[in-house]
């Protein structure tokens, strides 16, 4: 397929990218591609994951591990400045999600195909003549790093490529779906961070000036810097849209601010599927990739409700019912689909078509559409979201402007309270523009969703700990500076792009006693939109001394097969034996494929199946498999399969990986335990068997697939070929 994919890419460059670049800036009006050759090396797909749980029955979700290392030739020219530049090679590595939806009862069975990256892919471009290109007016503020960030972010959610396969599919619904939820991140404090600063030429070890960078998809937030403190308190709050899960993660990195290069202080990755299941997590997390340090987070999963039943309670919880501010923690989300306009006036020049764009604002938060050139019937098909503090008091202001003459072509004001009384809190219509032509209209679909924190019903002794994933990017391969992604210098002159809803600021009102977790918010000024100005305080019920002595919440699934579990298993074996001789594999067997991928620098373990497991009840067992790569016994190093219900011969066929080099992995041991799930209060939770696999084999690069005998402690396993 590669030659035909190359034909499509060349068409994309010449028919889509080239006109877009020409129209973006007057200095680029003579921009053109003189050569587009993607080379002979095709795109590689290194692995495919298909989701079978937590997905709609009318869709298929695939994750493709893609890798492209191409010696391509892409030459471009700007004739006006006699400038020539190009690209000699491109590398791109990442996880591309493919969604086939909706599934339909007629050929071709799939209504549309959507493609996007869940997280920003690793992108490297080898330029030729880049310095000449960056000398052109309008481009001199860019750099290699900023260009790569712009390209990478364009590939990440909420941006997506959608290919409709049948005409009945509503393209807008597929391209711009309603978010699955909103993640409210309370970025509270850290403890025991590394001291990176040095004095007297490194002889005296000092403290650090820590700050955090938080990522959800292409939404990036940066905290304030706490000077000279190894146990900093930030008390900041951020709200992020979550479009896709499973698979999307909350990524946090801590850095020490320095004049030259910021030092790395640790990282954390949390699976958002578990946050959604728990609704509320308030935990201390151990930082990865560093010898010490932990981070205190409170995470809330807010469900988008299509009715106003819970609005009064939500407004009370965030105190939006008493203050008059239009900023702070959000009670709802406004989703706006800008479709098109008709019969726009000419603007300043009679009989000349305008270059229309649309500016939308709620309070001080403003967003702007793309420009459509020389037309009075523009089509945008763009999607926007606004976090709303109080929809009963706020309005959506919309203005259509002519970019060429900087004049208004019409405006519109919609009270958000109107949506509260609409069906499904949604309005989809052509709106008549004020101060415009007699028949000038703007077609939009607007939906309001209340952000509700649903309470989970759980037993009094329930404990939970979020699954923390080990980052796949090693510290050595990390970008040490985040300044190109998030501005860190205060002032109105910031030019770095910020997410459309980057930060929710907060601070207690003077004279108001804080009795609960405060959520009062102060207005966020226009400066430094990439950073938070919040200063939420910890409630009086949790004194600083109490919080600072709090230990990381223990994980209920990280027992490393405790001695008690082993004793219980031996006792159960004696009961099963009942005076008779058990077979050679009394606890059953597990089939594993183990190999090391040098290309990905990862140990890959595929858990295929188990057979002849022991039964914990009359209905059998509810087995799942848990793995560690010893000696790492941290929660972040844990890998788990799904639970297979009521079976003694479960089939998993799930693949897991550990980021580790081949020389290092040959000194490690794989700890595999088969466990019975049971419920939270079930007495039937326990160990079904273990196996410890030494990885010192020279065959690890080739890999092997084997059946292993399960034993009560994992030692002396018998291999069954």
Image: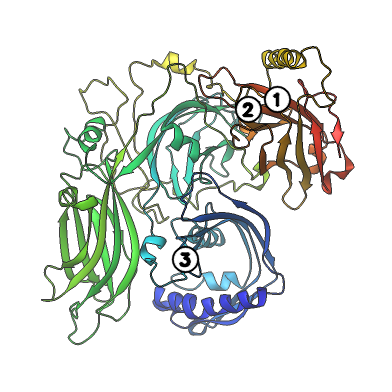
Q: Is residue 171 above or below residue 535?
A: below
On the question of residue 84 being in view, the answer is: no
Q: Give SS at disc 3.
A: strand
> Are discs 1 and 2 less than 8 Å apart at CB?
yes
- The residue located at (26%, 30%) in the rendering is 317
Could you give the CA–CA distance between mark 3 and mark 2, rounded to whole angstroms?
40 Å
On the question of residue 277 being in view, the answer is: yes
> Are discs 3 and 2 less than 8 Å apart at CB?
no
Give x and y (percent) for residue 660.
73, 41
First in residue order: circle 1 vs circle 2? 1
Q: Give SS at disc 1.
A: loop
- Write down the quadrant of residue 456 in the picture: top left
Front-lying residue, 48 or 331: 48
Could you give the CA–CA distance between mark 1 and mark 2, rounded to whole angstroms?
7 Å
Give x and y (percent) for residue 310.
24, 36
Q: Is residue 642 above or below residue 679?
A: below
Give x and y (percent) for residue 38.
65, 74
Q: Residues within 10 Å of mark 3 (few under 14, many from 20)?
A: many
Q: Residue 614: which numbered mark, if any? A: 1
Q: Nearer the viewer, mark 3 or mark 1?
A: 1
Give x and y (percent) for residue 493.
36, 54
Pointer 3 residue = 112
First in residue order: circle 3 vs circle 2? 3
- The residue located at (67%, 22%) in the rendering is 687
Front-lying residue, 520 or 196: 520
Pointer 2 residue = 621
Could you give the CA–CA distance between mark 3 and mark 1, rounded to whole angstroms?
46 Å
Q: Residues within 10 Å of mark 1 (few under 14, many from 20)?
A: many
């Amino acid at each position: 397929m590669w030659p035909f994919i190359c034909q499509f890419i060349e068409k994309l460059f010449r028919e889509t990218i080239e006109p877009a670049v020409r129209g973006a800036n007057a200095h680029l009006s003579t921009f053109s591609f003189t050569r587009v050759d993607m080379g002979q090396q095709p795109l590689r797909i290194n692995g495919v994951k298909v989701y079978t749980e937590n997905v709609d029955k009318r869709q298929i979700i695939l994750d493709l591990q893609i890798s492209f290392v191409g010696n391509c030739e892409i030459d471009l020219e700007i004739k006006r400045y006699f400038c020539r530049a190009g690209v000699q090679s491109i590398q791109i590595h990442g996880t591309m999600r493919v969604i086939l939806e909706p599934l339909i009862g007629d050929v071709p069975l799939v209504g549309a195909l959507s493609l996007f990256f869940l997280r920003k892919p690793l992108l490297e471009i080898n330029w030729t003549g880049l310095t000449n290109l960056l000398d052109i007016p309008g481009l001199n503020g860019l750099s290699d790093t900023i260009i790569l960030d712009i390209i990478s972010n364009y590939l990440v959610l909420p941006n997506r490529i959608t290919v409709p396969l049948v005409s009945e599919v509503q393209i807008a619904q597929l391209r711009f779906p309603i978010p699955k939820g909103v993640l409210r991140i309370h970025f509270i404090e850290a403890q025991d961070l590394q001291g990176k600063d040095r004095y007297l030429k490194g002889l005296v070890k000092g403290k650090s000036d820590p700050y955090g960078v938080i990522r959800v998809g292409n939404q990036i937030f940066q905290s304030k810097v706490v000077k000279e403190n190894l146990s900093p308190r930030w008390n900041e709050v951020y709200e992020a849209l979550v479009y896709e899960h499973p698979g999307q993660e909350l990524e946090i990195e801590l850095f020490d601010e320095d004049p030259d290069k910021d030092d790395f202080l640790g990282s954390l990755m949390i699976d958002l599927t578990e946050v959604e299941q728990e609704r509320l997590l308030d935990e201390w997390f151990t930082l990865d990739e560093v010898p010490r340090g932990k981070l205190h987070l409170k995470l809330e999963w807010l469900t988008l409700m299509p009715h106003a039943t819970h609005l009064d309670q939500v407004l009370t919880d965030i105190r939006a019912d008493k203050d008059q501010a239009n900023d702070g923690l959000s009670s709802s989300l406004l989703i706006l689909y800008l479709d098109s306009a008709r019969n726009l006036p000419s603007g300043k020049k009679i009989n000349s078509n305008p270059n229309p764009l649309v500016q939308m604002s709620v309070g001080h938060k403003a967003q702007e559409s793309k420009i459509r050139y020389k037309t009075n019937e523009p089509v945008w098909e763009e999607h926007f979201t606004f976090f709303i503090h109080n929809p009963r008091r706020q309005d959506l202001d919309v203005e259509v402007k002519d970019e060429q003459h900087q004049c208004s072509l019409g405006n519109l004001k919609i009270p958000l309270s109107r949506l509260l009384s609409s069906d499904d809190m949604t309005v989809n219509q052509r709106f008549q523009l004020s101060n415009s032509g007699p028949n000038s209209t703007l077609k939009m679909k607007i939906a309001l969703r209340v952000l509700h924190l649903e309470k989970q019903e759980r037993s009094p002794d329930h404990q939970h700990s979020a699954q923390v994933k080990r980052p796949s990017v090693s510290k050595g391969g990390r970008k040490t500076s985040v300044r190109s992604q998030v501005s860190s210098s205060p002032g109105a002159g910031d030019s770095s792009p910020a997410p459309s809803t980057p930060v929710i600021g907060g601070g207690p009102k003077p004279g108001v006693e804080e009795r609960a977790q405060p959520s009062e918010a102060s207005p966020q000024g226009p400066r430094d939109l990439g950073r938070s100005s919040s200063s939420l305080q910890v409630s009086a019920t949790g004194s600083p001394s109490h919080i600072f002595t709090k230990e990381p919440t223990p994980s209920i699934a990280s027992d490393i097969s405790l001695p008690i579990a082993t004793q219980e298993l031996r006792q159960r074996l004696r009961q099963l034996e009942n005076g008779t001789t058990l077979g050679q594999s009394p606890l059953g067997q597990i089939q594993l494929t183990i190999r090391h991928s040098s290309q990905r620098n990862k140990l890959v373990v595929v858990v295929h199946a188990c057979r002849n497991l022991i039964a914990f009840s009359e209905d059998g067992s509810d087995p799942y498999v848990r793995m560690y790569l010893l000696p790492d016994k941290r929660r972040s190093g844990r890998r788990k399969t799904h639970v297979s219900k009521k079976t003694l011969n479960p089939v998993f066929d799930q693949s897991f990986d550990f980021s580790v080099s081949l020389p290092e992995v040959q000194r490690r041991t794989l700890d595999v335990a088969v466990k019975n799930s049971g419920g939270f209060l079930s007495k039937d939770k326990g160990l079904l068997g273990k196996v410890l696999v030494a990885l010192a084999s020279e065959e690890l690069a080739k890999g092997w697939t084997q059946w292993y005998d399960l034993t009560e402690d994992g030692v002396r396993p018998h291999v069954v070929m």
